[in-house]
Image (cartoon, grey):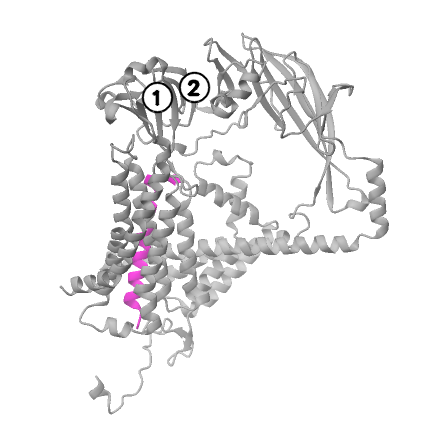
């Protein structure tokens, strides 16, 4: 009986926490709606205030300073940089050199074949997560269920076929980390694991957790935590391509587009012959490239990388190019007629390197340019909601925001649920923390006062004090939802008491019973 | 015996729903299998002599692709409809007094309802799911069988319907006002369905599911037994 009572209390507490989570989400929704309304009102108010003279000055200013034209910075295989502008107004394309001299001009429609275009530029593979120092382990992606995307359990079947005849099928088991091979009529032919091909299940050695898998037209590349395997299904061989002491934080097979059927024609037309390679970055920041055709391996270090840099790479017949794009953002003073906007200047710089066989990066070209952009004021600026309404948000949110203050890509979180909680906490976190704490303390006092007459136990009251102390208004709302019981005046002590216990919580007096009637005996 | 009689009575009352689901879902599932058959159409097992000229292709497609959301939707709808039948309609018709004042305890009644709901949920959709899985495993028709984990995943989605049943049940028998915890239980159910729809491993999903079913069932039993009808 005692243990059942404990289970009942624990399950009740968990249910109360579930209610609290729901209230937190409701608070988030209300906060966002109010913020949106406030932003809309402010925008409408500002628009109404702009006078005719202001509009005239805006027009005049725009005439003086036209919008900078957007140009793409492209690189030819002979290391030359071109500035390419695509104008959608007159369906024309313009090519300039770095000094602004027009090299080519012609009609161009993005949806039409551009065979008339005289240049073919290098296609760089952007290394999106490179250098961020975060592992992209996401709790083993292949083991994850993906219900939202309405896909079932993520399994891989490797079909080896010839003229509509399937010779072999190799099925990957994400939980166990190996492939099982099936021959004609689903007859099991063996297993492929880290130790290679084996016929018996007892001999199999797992590849370990699959972080990312890539497949070229010939082979499968299995990137684990700190090893990369090259699996050849036709020959039934497994080779360890890389074996590192540090964890792998980035791995990519390039050019990945060779795998797409629709790009075969595009590849055939191309004059540039790309060399496929496999690139890996480990936790210590070092890069490791393996060229897949000639098996050459190059290890190198990236040039010192600022926060605003991004890297991309491409390998052709005799060269390996690295492109570093640096971008520095600087806030400018807003003109008087556009105070509802923020103006920024971006100082951009592209630095081109060639990777030598000994791992040295040789800088051979660079190009710099600046551009100005303006953005509407963010909702976070001078917003009443952000400044004052956020004081009602949970006190715990600024702590979470502080813990996760660095912007991290979504895949660096081990669990999607943690990412959701962090984003929720960041978006409604209090701006004025002192006010937030004061509000929280006031609500705690209110809870103590309110629960004096309604409490069932001191442990229950303590539980709610902690919850309200940490979760401020959402905590207090959840408390009221669960505990707002009606109270009566005790006939013995005259103070307020609730009706859930037969004894008064203050004086212990029993609830008054109605006076007996003559018919009670018969009805009983 | 009394428990069994009550249990059979619940089954009898819901057997119509089960039959309708079987009649509707088996052809629907068959259509989905037919639709996903195209990938393997015309492909047959060959011999290993052609290995040198063979090409490799990787597929993560499944025979039961795109059925996850449908299964989740049907199981949640069924869980909600069972909860309405078990808890909301007696409250609306004010027949709890009649149901409770039999020669059985409140605990027997609530346990019977919980067990019969689970049984009906798995008999209706679980049965259909199992049948379709057996059809999909036919080696004469399909090159490779679906993975067994897909079947377990399907059962997991069916169990999410039971979470919906418990949450709607809690809302149905709650004495609280709509702005207190009554409507919150519906939101809790919605939240849990969203949580279970997010990306997580199957093992963690099953553990979470068992945990929340246990917690919600404890609360439902506790509320039902302590409430005056």
Q: Viewer-proximal residue, A379 or B117? A: B117
SS for callout 1 = strand
Q: Is residue B210 above or below residue A275?
A: below
Residue B28: image location, x then y, percent: 34, 47
Q: Observer-nearest residue: A160 or A493?
A: A160
Residue reaching furthest to the bottom: A518
Q: Quadrant of the C terminus of chain A?
A: bottom left
User: Magenta stretch: residue A248 in it?
Assistant: no
- Mark 1–mark 2 distance (CA, rounded to whole Å): 12 Å
- Residue at label 1? A161
Indicate which label's residue lies in the foreground, 1 or 2. 1
**Residue A98 location (% of width, % of height):** 74, 19
Q: Which residues are magenta?
A: B200-229
Q: Is residue A32 above or below residue A524?
A: above
**Residue at coordinates 82% horizontally, 35% vertically from top-left?**
A65
The disc, 1 or 2, on the residue closer to the chain's N-terminal end is: 1
A303 to the left or right of A253: right
Residue under circle 2? A217
């Amino acid at each position: 009986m005692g243990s059942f009572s404990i289970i009942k209390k624990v399950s009740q507490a968990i249910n109360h926490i579930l209610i609290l989570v729901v209230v937190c989400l409701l608070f988030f929704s209300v906060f966002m709606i109010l913020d949106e309304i406030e932003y809309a009102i402010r925008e409408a108010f500002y628009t109404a205030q702009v006078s005719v003279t202001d509009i005239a000055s805006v027009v005049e200013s725009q005439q003086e300073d036209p919008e900078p034209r957007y140009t793409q910075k492209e690189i030819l295989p002979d290391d030359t940089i071109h500035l390419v502008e695509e104008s959608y107004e007159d369906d024309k394309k313009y090519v300039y050199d770095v000094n602004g001299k027009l090299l080519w001009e012609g009609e161009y429609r993005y949806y039409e074949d551009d065979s008339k275009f005289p240049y073919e530029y290098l296609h760089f593979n952007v290394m999106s997560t490179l250098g961020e120092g975060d592992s992209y382990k996401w709790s083993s992606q292949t083991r994850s269920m993906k219900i939202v995307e309405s896909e079932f359990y993520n399994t891989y079947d490797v079909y080896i076929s010839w003229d509509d005849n399937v010779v072999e099928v190799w099925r990957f088991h994400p939980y166990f980390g190996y492939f099982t091979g099936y021959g004609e009529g689903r007859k099991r032919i063996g297993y492929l694991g880290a130790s290679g091909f084996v016929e018996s299940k007892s001999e199999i050695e797992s590849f370990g957790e699959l972080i990312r898998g890539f497949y070229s037209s010939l082979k499968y590349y299995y990137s684990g935590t700190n090893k990369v395997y090259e699996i050849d299904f036709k020959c039934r061989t497994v080779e360890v391509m890389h074996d590192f002491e540090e964890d792998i934080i980035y791995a990519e097979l390039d050019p990945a587009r060779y795998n797409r059927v629709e790009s075969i024609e595009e590849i055939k037309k191309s004059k540039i012959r790309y060399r496929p390679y496999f690139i890996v970055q480990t936790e210590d920041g070092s890069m490791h490239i393996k060229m897949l055709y000639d098996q050459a391996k190059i290890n190198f270090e990236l040039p010192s990388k600022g926060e605003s840099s991004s890297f991309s790479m491409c390998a052709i017949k005799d060269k390996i190019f690295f492109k570093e794009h640096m971008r520095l953002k600087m806030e400018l003073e807003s003109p008087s007629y556009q105070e509802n906007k923020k103006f920024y200047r971006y100082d951009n710089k592209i630095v081109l390197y060639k990777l030598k066989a000994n791992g040295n990066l040789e800088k051979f070209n660079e190009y710099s340019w600046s551009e100005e952009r303006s953005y509407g004021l963010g909702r976070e600026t001078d917003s009443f909601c952000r400044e004052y309404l956020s004081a009602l948000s949970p006190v715990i949110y600024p702590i979470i925001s502080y813990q996760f203050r660095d912007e991290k890509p979504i895949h660096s979180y081990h669990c999607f649920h943690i990412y959701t909680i962090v984003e929720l906490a960041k978006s409604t976190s209090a701006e004025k923390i002192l006010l937030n704490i004061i509000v929280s303390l006031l609500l705690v006092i209110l809870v103590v006062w309110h629960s004096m007459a309604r409490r069932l136990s001191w442990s229950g009251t303590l539980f709610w004090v902690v919850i309200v102390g940490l979760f401020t208004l959402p905590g207090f709302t959840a408390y009221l939802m669960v505990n707002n019981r009606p109270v009566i005046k005790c006939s013995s002590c005259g103070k307020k008491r609730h009706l859930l216990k037969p004894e008064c919580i203050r004086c212990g007096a029993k609830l008054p019973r109605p006076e007996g009637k003559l018919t009670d005996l018969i009805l009983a | 015996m009394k428990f069994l009689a009550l249990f059979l009575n619940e089954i009898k009352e819901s057997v119509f729903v089960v039959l309708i689901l079987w009649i509707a879902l088996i052809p629907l599932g068959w259509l989905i299998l037919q639709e996903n058959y195209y990938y393997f159409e015309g492909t047959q097992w060959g011999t290993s002599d052609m290995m040198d000229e063979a090409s490799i292709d990787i597929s993560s497609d499944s025979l039961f692709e795109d059925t996850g959301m449908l299964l989740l939707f049907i199981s949640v709808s069924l869980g909600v409809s069972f909860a309405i039948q078990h808890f909301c309609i007696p409250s609306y018709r004010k027949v709890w007094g009649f149901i409770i004042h039999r020669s059985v305890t409140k605990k027997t009644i609530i346990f019977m309802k919980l067990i019969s709901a689970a049984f009906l949920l798995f008999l209706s959709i679980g049965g259909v799911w199992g049948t379709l899985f057996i059809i999909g495993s036919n080696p004469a028709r399909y090159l490779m069988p679906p993975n067994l984990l897909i079947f377990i995943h399907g059962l997991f989605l069916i169990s999410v319907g039971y979470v919906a049943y418990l949450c709607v049940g809690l809302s149905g028998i709650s004495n609280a006002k709509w702005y207190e915890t009554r409507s919150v239980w519906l939101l809790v159910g919605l939240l849990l369905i969203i949580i279970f729809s997010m990306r997580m491993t199957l093992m963690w999903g099953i553990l979470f599911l068992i945990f929340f079913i246990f917690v919600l069932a404890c609360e439902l039993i506790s509320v039902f037994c302590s409430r005056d009808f």
